[in-house]
Amino acid sequence: MLQETQRRLEGLDCGPAIVVCNSEHRFMVADQLRGEIAESPAIILEPAGRNTAPAIALAAFQAQAQHSQALLLVLPADHHVTDPASFRAAVERARAPAQAGKLMTFGVVPSRPETGYGYVRCGEALADGTFSLAEFVEKPDQASAARYVADGTYYWNSGLFLFRADRYLEALGQHQPAMLAACEQAMAKAERDLDFIRPDAEAFLASPADSIDYAVMEHTKAGGVSTLDCGWTDVGAWSALWEIGAPDNVGNVCEGDVLLHDARNNYVRSESRLVTALGVEDLVVVETADAVMVGARDRVQDIKQVVEALSASNRPEAATHQKVFRPWGSYESLVIGEQFQVKRLTVTPGQTLSLQLHHHRAEHWVVVSGEAEITRGEEQLTLGPDQSTYIPIGMKHRLANRGAVPLEVIEVQSGSYLGEDDIVRFDDVYGREETPT
């Protein structure tokens, strides 16, 4: 979806992308955008979540550093659009009022009375398809939603924005001065880490947490709306994937290895094994390598309560994934047992792991595809598919992919302790801390 968000901009005159995310997602974001855009994006790593208003402020300071009157097009990465050309037309309509100082949002033409979205009410017309912003409206009940759709001046609140970076910061300073000051200081003290920008954590954590709607847009007198009719969906829940999917003749949307019998109007997703269901209706079933979720299609928004319960129980599923991204690629845990673990390593072409050793585990590497360049103590090895090597406890080693295709390696770990902190780094091309002893 991040890639789709970027591709949606093709044909618009855009500068380099700015992505705001958390540190855990940084390598995933960089990997997903690699090859999608000509210029490397500026990836800003939030020290902590503070909602959308501070996140956009960080991006605004970055954009302003590139151009004093830069226009900032704010795009959440969890939206789906079926008509990108109409989306781009709405952006172009908003460009002139945004350059003139308006804080433009995008109001989606409602296709039905919807209680899951907030609404924006349009005021006087500015130009073709653009209006002044009269007010934001919270998620309504069914009767109010029906009234809004019939009225014709209410549109779904998309969470998309276009404005000059300096005008947003000016409005933020007027309505949330403490937030502006914290974000400004955080970016002034920001450090660069490879391709990532790390705002100062202490300064940023002093910022109040609030959405752009509450912090700025509900108070500004300079708001505007560009109407948007592009097959837009906010994919904020699993049920939304059922809505935008390609159903079978009885309404089931299936992804992966799925077998259904006498089932209707379900969304079923399998990522690692066969999932079967019979005699069920209106369910969401999602299978991943580490967990299975089953819920009523109209209740999946309550998944937050499940995550809270997992977190309260200190369950690892609430915080970690089976697949972990690193600057060199990714690794995925396949089997975990007592004093052994099996992983699949995928090394991106041209990338290399750190020169390292482990005090508590040995490793056996089997090359599945690609060509591995391996440092093993004083040896230098080149291994292809079906070839392997053994790394004893305490031996310095390194793995690299000098080829043009991804390198896949099965790694079998054995030892008394298999934690990721059992790594002593001696050399690392990504600037991660070296810890020789």
Image (cartoon, helix red, strand yellow):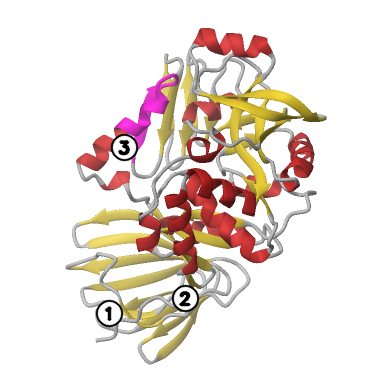
Residue of label 1: 392
Q: Point out the tag, 3 or 1, that comes first from the N-terminus.
A: 3
Labels 1 and 2: the sequence-earlier one: 1
Q: Nearer the viewer, mark 3 or mark 1?
A: 3
Q: In this view, does 201 lie to the left or right of 99?
A: left
| Residue 292 vs residue 18, the one in the foreground | 18
Amino acid type of the residue that numbered disc 1 sits on in the rendered structure: Pro
Q: Is residue 105 above or below residue 281?
A: below
- Read off the residue under disc 3: 307
Q: Does the magenta stretch include residue 74?
A: no
User: Residue 70's x, y, as percent?
Assistant: 69, 56
Give the residues drawn in magenta, as a range.
Answer: 291-305
**Residue located farthest toward the bottom when viewing the structure as drawn:** 378
Which x, y percent locates residue 346? 48, 63
Q: Rounded to the nearest whole Å, what is the CA distance between mark 3 and mark 1?
A: 39 Å
Question: Which residue was labeled with disc 2?
Answer: 430
Give the secondary structure at mark 1: loop
- Res 41 visible: no
Question: Dot 3: few (<14), some (14–19), or many (≥20) neighbours within 10 Å?
Answer: some
Q: Position of residue 235 (x, y in %)?
A: 54, 33
Residue at point 58%, 14% (across, down): 113
User: What is the quadrant of residue 162 in the picture?
Assistant: top right
Labels 1, 2: front one? 2
State the residue in front, 170 or 406. Answer: 170
The image quarter containing residue 78 is top right
Residue 411 position (above or below residue 47): below
The CA span between labels 2 and 3 is 33 Å
State whether residue 16 appears in this view.
Answer: yes
